[in-house]
Image: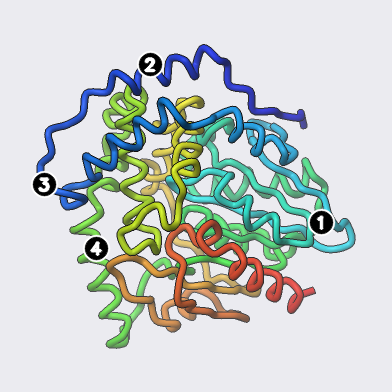
C-alpha cells in the first residue's frame, strides 16, 4: 500500500487550457437542453474552466484526504474509530471518489472510498469489469490490505450494485449495506403488482428518452472514448448532461453542483484519461450473472429521479430479505451522497448503530 498525492503536471494543465480555448462548438440542434447539453451553457462553462477555474486549489482540497494505491486500486482511507466496523463508500458513473467526500466528513467511523476499476488512478480489472469482479477487488482491499474483519458498504448506481454483490458473496464479513435507488431483483417473478408495473413501464419510457448514452457506451465504448479523450469540452458536455438530468436540480444544474464542482469532476476524468475505461462496467454488463437474494441487513434511501416515479417498496423486498430502514426523502437525486450529505449521513449512521 503506497501513499498517493494528486499532482497534475503543469504542462498537462497548459495543454488542457489551450484545448479549451480552441474549442469548436457545435451548431445547436435545438434550444436550451432539448437535444442534450445547452450550447450556451457549455460555452460559458468552457470559458470558466479555461480562464477562471483554479485546479491547484481543488487539487489541494482533495489532497487533504489521505489517499493510497494498493493492488491497482486508488482509494481514500480515513481512520477515526478502530473499535467499530468501518464503512466502504462506493461511487458510480459519471462520478468519482470526490462525490463521496462530503458524506465521509460527517461519519464517525473509519471510511474507505475506492475509485472504481478503470476510473481515475485505479487500473481496470484484468478480465471483464463485472460487479462480481469489482466486489472481489473491494473485499480484498477491505480485508487483506486494510485488515478489517467486518465492514459496512454504501453506494448508488454501479456502487449500489456492487454493494449487493458484496453482501451476497461475503455475508459473514459484510455487516450490512445502505443503497441508493435499489436494491433491484435479478428478475421479476409473477405476479407483478399494479404499482410495480407502473414503475417498470416508466423505466422503459425513461430508457427511450435518456438511454442512448448507455446503448452506445455499452456497445461501442472505444468509439465514444476516441472523441472524448481528445476534446475536453466534449468530455464536459457528456458528463454535465447527466449531472443535470439525474440530479434533483429541477433543471438548474448549479443549484446542486457549483462550477468548481463540475470542473473538478471533469478535470479528474481528463487528466487521468479514464473516460474510456469508465465505460467498461456498461460494456461488460452482459457478463453479470443473476445475483442471489440479499440476506444481510439493508437500508434503502430512495433518490428522486427526474422523469421516474419512486419504485415501490415491494421491488426492494423482492431483492432483499432483511430491509431494516427504508426512506423516500423529498429531495436528492442520483448523486444523493453529494446532493444531500447530511440526510444520507444521518440514515447511514442510524443504520450502522442499529446493527452494531
Front of the two marks 1 and 4: 4
Query: Which mark, residue 247?
Result: none
N-terminal label among 1 and 2: 2
**Earlier residue among tags 2 and 4:** 2
Mark 1 residue element: loop
| Residue 206: assigned label | 4
Left or right of 327? Residue 108 is right
Number of residues whose C-alpha sits closer than 10 Å to that of mark 4, classed few (under 14), some (14–19) or many (20 or more): some
Q: Earlier in the sequence, mark 4 or mark 3?
A: 3
Q: Quadrant of the N terminus?
A: top right
Location of mark 3 (residue): 30
Image depth: mark 4 or mark 3 in front = 3
From what the image shows, is residue 41 above or below residue 346?
Answer: above
> Helix or strand or loop: what does disc 4 sit on?
helix
Residue at x 80%, y 73% (from the top left corner)? 356
Pointer 1: what residue?
149
What crowding class fits label 1: few (fewer than 14 Cα within 10 Å), some (14-19), or many (20 or more)? some
As drawn, which residue projects farthest toward the front?
52
Residue occupying image coordinates x 39% and y 81%: 312
Can residue 5 be seen?
yes
Q: Quadrant of residue 204?
A: bottom left
Q: Is residue 204 left or right of residue 319?
A: left
Q: On screen, 189 above or below 248?
A: below
Q: Position of residue 158 (x, y in %)?
A: 47, 53
Residue at (23%, 40%) from the top-left corner?
Answer: 40
Mark 2 = which residue?
18
Tell whether label 2 touches label 1 (CB within 8 Å): no
Amino acid at each position: 500500500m503506497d501513499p498517493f498525492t494528486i499532482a497534475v503536471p503543469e504542462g498537462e494543465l497548459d495543454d488542457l487550457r489551450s484545448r479549451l480555448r480552441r474549442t469548436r462548438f457545435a451548431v445547436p440542434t435545438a434550444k436550451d437542453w432539448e437535444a442534450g447539453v445547452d450550447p450556451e451553457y457549455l460555452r460559458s462553462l468552457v470559458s470558466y474552466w479555461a480562464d477562471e477555474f483554479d485546479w491547484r486549489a481543488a487539487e489541494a482540497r482533495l489532497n487533504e484526504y489521505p489517499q493510497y494505491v494498493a493492488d491497482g486500486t486508488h482509494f481514500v482511507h480515513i481512520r477515526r474509530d478502530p473499535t467499530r466496523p468501518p464503512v466502504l463508500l462506493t461511487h458510480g458513473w459519471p462520478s468519482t471518489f470526490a462525490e463521496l467526500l462530503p458524506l465521509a466528513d460527517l461519519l464517525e467511523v473509519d471510511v474507505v472510498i475506492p475509485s472504481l476499476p478503470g476510473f481515475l488512478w485505479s487500473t481496470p480489472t484484468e478480465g471483464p469489469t463485472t460487479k462480481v469482479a469489482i466486489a472481489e477487488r473491494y473485499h480484498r482491499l477491505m480485508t487483506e490490505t486494510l485488515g478489517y474483519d467486518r465492514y459496512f458498504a454504501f453506494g448508488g448506481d454501479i456502487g449500489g450494485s456492487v454493494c449487493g454483490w458484496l453482501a451476497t458473496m461475503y455475508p459473514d464479513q459484510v455487516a450490512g449495506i445502505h443503497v441508493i435507488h435499489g436494491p433491484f431483483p435479478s428478475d421479476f417473478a409473477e405476479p407483478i403488482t399494479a404499482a410495480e408495473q407502473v414503475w417498470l413501464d416508466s423505466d422503459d419510457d425513461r430508457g427511450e428518452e435518456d438511454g442512448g448514452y448507455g446503448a452506445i457506451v455499452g456497445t461501442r465504448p472505444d468509439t465514444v472514448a476516441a472523441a472524448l479523450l481528445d476534446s475536453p469540452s466534449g468530455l464536459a458536455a457528456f458528463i454535465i448532461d447527466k449531472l443535470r438530468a439525474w440530479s434533483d436540480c429541477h433543471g438548474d444544474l448549479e443549484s446542486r453542483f457549483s462550477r468548481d464542482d463540475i470542473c473538478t469532476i471533469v478535470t479528474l476524468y481528463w487528466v487521468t484519461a479514464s473516460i474510456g475505461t469508465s465505460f467498461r462496467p456498461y460494456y461488460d454488463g452482459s457478463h453479470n450473472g443473476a445475483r442471489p437474494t440479499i440476506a444481510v441487513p439493508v437500508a434503502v434511501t430512495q433518490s428522486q429521479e427526474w422523469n421516474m416515479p419512486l419504485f415501490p417498496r415491494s421491488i426492494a423486498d423482492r431483492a432483499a430479505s432483511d430491509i431494516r430502514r427504508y426512506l423516500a426523502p423529498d429531495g436528492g437525486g442520483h448523486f444523493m451522497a453529494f446532493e444531500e450529505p447530511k440526510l444520507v449521513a444521518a440514515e447511514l449512521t442510524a443504520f450502522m448503530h442499529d446493527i452494531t
